[in-house]
Amino acid sequence: MNHAWLAGIARRRSIATLLLLASLAVSLVSGGVHAQAPADALPSWNDGVPKQAIQQFVEATTSIGGANFVPPEERIATFDQDGTLWVEQPMYTQVLYCFDRLAELAKLKPELWQIEPFKTVLSGDRAAIVKLSLPELDKVLVVTLTGMTVEDFRGEVRDWLARAKDPRWKRPYTDLAYQPMKELLAYLRTNGFKTYIVTGGGQDFVRVYAEAVYGIPPEQVVGTATGVTYSYDGLGNPILTKDPKLLLNDNAAGKPEGIHFLIGRRPYAAFGNSTGDRQMLEYTAAGQGLRLSMLLFHDDGQREYAYGPAQGLSDTKVGTFTQDLYDDAMKKGWTIVSMKADWKRIFAFE
């Protein structure tokens, strides 16, 4: 056999293969075949400072060998819920649930109609309800959120969410999650971040729907928590009953405390929208390496709501964003997201 002849054929084939590959490469560059550009992971965000800050943060913290690379196990991102992930105006969704739940309890306990603050809530007088103090509202929450097994509570919340609708949009409250934030959650998870909800709302309440709405499992929800008691039902089955004993007030300073207690790692990114989130963003920003602290500013009264009182917007007890917080965020280099300027759309159904 002529081995030299075979070797010559092999060389000619190798050269031909190289020429073909080179031809394809030229074709790609010249436009003969167009390479597909990577899809925009944040399509509901306008191209502005916040979107760029998010993309640059993710690229920097996930680039192996880079100065700001963060190992996957340390990639923690925390999100407030009310006003950050979904609508909080004119009243927190959980409080609305409690008001409806109180009406059901009053059928079994008519005496509630004669006792304040229950009497005011049951009257339906919105002007009077708005004037209730936080301690008075806490009494309503205690009566409506405790005294039942955790399974019964979950069932009641699921049933309520299935039938209750927001009066403005006439849609289930779970439809009022912000599409840009859902995209952000997915974008972070795609890049190895573990996403947590850290909310002043009830931990058990949010855990009912967090996975279906945000893709966040119940074990990654940190919220205001009450105690539970282990006992047995009439058939001897073990149960947990919700008690009126506060274990964690997960608001303001309670947020970094809850993060330490239940997560055990300082976040690399934190997202909020009110004074109740300041400490969580401070705690995040104080860590070593590149960190991202971001505040959502509700300044779109047409598509959603406009409130502050920062930047001259109306004051509110629900999701207060003071001028002091606004100025402090600017001074510290935190990113402020303008709902009006930075979001192409707000809800998935738009």
Image (cartoon, grey):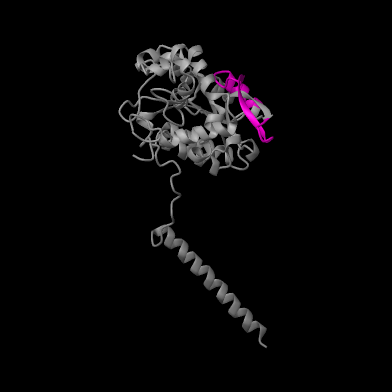
Q: Is residue 82 visible?
A: yes
Tell me where residue 123 appears, x and y as whole percent.
38, 17
- The total of numbered circles placed on residues is 0
**Quarter location, residue 304:** top left
Depth check: give the residue in front, 6 or 39: 39
Tell me where residue 136 appears, x and y as whole percent.
49, 12
Tell me where residue 255 appears, x and y as whole percent.
58, 22
Residue 36 in the figure: left or right of residue 221:
left
Residue 247 in the figure: left or right of residue 175:
right
The residue lying furthest to the left in this view is 302
Is 102 included in the stretch rendered in magenta?
A: no
Give the residue drawn at x 59%, y 24%.
225
Is 255 included in the stretch rendered in magenta?
A: yes
Q: Is residue 215 above or below residue 233?
A: below
Give the residue drawn at x 55%, y 41%.
189
Q: Is residue 80 above or below residue 137?
A: below
What's the magenta region?
Answer: 232-261
Give the residue drawn at x 67%, y 83%.
3
Depth check: give the residue in front, 64 or 104: 104
**Quarter location, residue 32:** bottom left
